[in-house]
Amino acid sequence: EVQLVESGGGLVKPGGSLRLSCAASGFTFSSYSMNWVRQAPGKGLEWVSSISSSSSYIYYADSVKGRFTISRDNAKNSLYLQMNSLRAEDTAVYYCARGPLIAVAGTLDYWGQGTLVTVSS
Amino acid sequence: SYVLTQPPSVSVAPGQTARITCGGNNIGSKSVHWYQQKPGQAPVLVVYDDSDRPSGIPERFSGSNSGNTATLTISRVEAGDEADYYCQVWDSSSDHQAVFGGGTKLTVL
């Protein structure tokens, strides 16, 4: 069974940093691209970032480019999102989602339950 | 950047057919994926690559995509189908990015 479990969310002050983690199990993690998607309270889904299976291709939404860094450790079956210079508008539930096999572009077929990030003074 | 447009809400009586549209420039040339999200839960993939269903998704869920509009069709709607539905594509035209529609709230009357 595919499982994705996010952690690392919490309350942080504007300008602060936070590192999210996503622990994957039930599939060959190193073969799949991975994604972060967020959802602000009461709002729709917003794609944040994608990383290919071997980390060769990395993409970011314009809203986080230069502030967030996606990475993965295939030996640990883990995905990360380093978030710096956080703003109030980054407040959201952050979901980890599995992408396609090998390629980055495509569907997000499994999602974690999400971790809440609140940016507030 | 690429924009996907969905109606904010769709209402349908139980047993009827719900159609949720997703508009985008020449969206027929892209693969469209649909997600269902119930309150307090993570999204669930219900249709991928325009019209394919993941295992475990009822046949009542189907999709189509042509021209400038993709459509998610839910036949014989049940109370349990009430949820938010999002369409999604991958845009490789400029910056590579996943794009979500704004979401449609399906209300079962």
Image (spheres, rainbow, N blue to C red):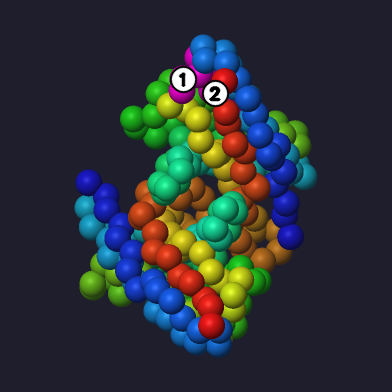
Residue bounds of the magenta highlight: B72-79
Residue at screen point 60% across, 20% down: B12
| Label 1 close to label 2 by CB (< 8 Å) | yes
Task: Decide if residue A90 is in sight here.
Answer: yes
Quadrant of the image occupied by residue B86: top right
Asked if A73 appears above or below B3 in the picture, the reply is: below
Label 1 element class = loop
Residue at screen point 37% across, 49% down: A110
Which amino acid is tagged 2?
Answer: Val
Residue at screen point 43% across, 26% down: B80
Q: Chain of mark 2?
A: B
Q: Position of residue B64 (x, y in %)?
A: 61, 28
Residue A5 is inside the magenta segment: no
Residue B77 is inside the magenta segment: yes
Q: Is residue A75 left or right of residue A51?
A: left
Q: Residue furthest top?
A: B15
Crowding around mark 1 (Cα neighbors within 10 Å: few <14, some 14 to 19, many 20+) is some
Residue at screen point 51% across, 50% down: A106
Nearest the camera: A40 or B62?
A: A40
Q: Position of residue B24 (x, y in %)?
A: 74, 43
* Residue identified by numbered label 1: B78
Q: Chain of mark 1?
A: B
* Residue identified by numbered label 2: B108
Which amino acid is tagged 1?
Answer: Glu
Nearest the camera: A57 or A89?
A: A89
Asked if A60 appears above or below A83 in the picture, the reply is: above
Task: Decide if residue A68 is in sight here.
Answer: no
Label 2 element class = strand
Q: Position of residue B76 (x, y in %)?
A: 50, 14
